[in-house]
């Protein structure tokens, strides 16, 4: 990976909020007459977080179970950040915290609030995964939310995953600061979301002829969609260990944070 010395340094005070990228697994073990359960908890965000911290960004990480109750509920709370990143976190996690689902109390629609924040000048990135965009069995279900209106992509109605177990290498379309320093071809990925660019947005990466990285704007804010994972399983070890891994996120978040405008 790129070293701290090689990384482009962000302006002081650039703050990123990352929500999602965690999961728990429960397994049933059956041995003849007897069975028992085991469970595990994992987070897939740390390569991404380390890449941003190497460039001088500050990242606040809310795993899924934490984001459910602690994701910002006011514009004032969101204003503490330059960029919000949603990765593998379904719409229901942000729409139905315990106060609503279990206790029946009303609270702000945090996806509508996030869309309002973007239109007012905030920046938003959605990263792909089984619970991003529409996701597996369409359970991420962002297509029918207020947030869909500010994303630079149009989503399918149902399950939008494209599994590529054979591995397909994304192509980079140069010339935009959000892909600065990247080669023309990236290591192969094992899956992605099928998305269409919203009119007025710009496709900066493709895979198998489809859009993979799309940028756009909504009101005064900048938006981006990266249609594959930031970690396993759609990014295999060869991608995560690739020396250009850090540069992808540094360039992407740098553009969203407006570093090109400040320069």
Image (tube, grey):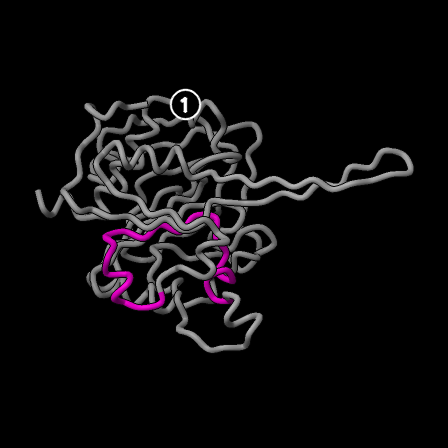
Q: Position of residue 197 (x, y in %)?
A: 36, 52
Q: Percent from the top left, x then y, of residue 90? A: 50, 56
x, y (%) of residue 246? 31, 30
Residue 100 relative to residue 57: left or right: right
Foreground residue, 237 or 159?
A: 237
Instruction: Name which quarter of the figure residue 2 lies in.
Output: top left
The answer to whether residue 63 is left or right of residue 157 is left
Residue 146 drawn above or below residue 14: below
Q: Identify whether 81 is placed above or below 229.
A: below
In the foreground, 56 or 153: 56
* Element type at mark 1: loop
The reply, left or right, for residue 7 in relation to residue 188 is left
Q: Which residue is tagged 1? A: 241
Residue at point 56%, 41% (across, down): 41
> In percent of the image, x 57 and y 53: which residue is there?
159
Q: Is residue 62 magenta?
A: no
> Which span is picked out in magenta?
73-96
Quarter of the image with the N terminus is: top left
Kindly indicate the quadrant of the structure image that contains residue 45.
Answer: top left
**In the figure, residue 78 lies in which quadrant?**
bottom left
Label 1 neighbour load within 10 Å: few <14, some 14-19, many 20+: some
Residue drawn 39% across the image and 59% down it: 71
Q: Is 93 part of what is drawn in magenta?
A: yes
Give residue 55's position: percent from left, percent from top: 23, 34
Q: Residue placed at 41% from the left, 71% from the top?
A: 109
From the image, which quarter does the C terminus lie in? top left
| 178 to 215, vertically: above or below | above
Q: Residue farthest to the left?
A: 263
Number of marks in picture: 1
């Amino acid at each position: 990976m790129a070293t701290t010395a090689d990384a482009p340094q962000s302006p002081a005070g650039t703050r990123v909020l990352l929500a999602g990228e965690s999961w728990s697994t429960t397994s049933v073990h059956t041995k003849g007459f007897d069975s028992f359960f085991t469970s595990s908890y994992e987070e897939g965000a740390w390569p991404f977080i380390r890449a941003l911290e190497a460039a001088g960004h500050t990242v606040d990480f809310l795993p899924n179970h934490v984001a459910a109750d602690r994701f910002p509920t006011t514009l004032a709370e969101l204003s503490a950040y330059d960029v919000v990143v949603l990765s593998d976190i379904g719409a229901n996690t942000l729409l139905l915290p315990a106060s609503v689902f279990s206790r029946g109390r009303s609270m702000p629609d945090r996806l509508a609030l996030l869309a309002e924040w973007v239109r007012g000048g905030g920046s938003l990135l959605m990263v792909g995964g089984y619970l991003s965009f529409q996701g597996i069995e369409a359970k991420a279900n962002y297509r029918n939310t207020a947030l869909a209106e500010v994303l630079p992509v149009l989503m399918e109605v149902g399950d939008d995953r494209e599994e590529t177990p054979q591995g397909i290498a994304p192509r980079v379309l140069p010339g935009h600061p959000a892909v600065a320093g990247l080669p023309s071809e990236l290591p192969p990925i094992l899956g992605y979301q099928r998305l269409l660019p919203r009119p007025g947005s710009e496709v900066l990466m493709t895979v198998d002829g489809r859009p993979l990285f799309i940028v756009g704007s909504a009101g005064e804010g900048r938006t981006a969609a990266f249609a594959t994972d930031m970690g396993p399983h759609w990014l295999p070890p060869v991608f995560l260990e690739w020396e250009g891994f850090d540069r992808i996120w540094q360039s992407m978040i740098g553009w969203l944070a407006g570093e090109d405008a400040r320069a």
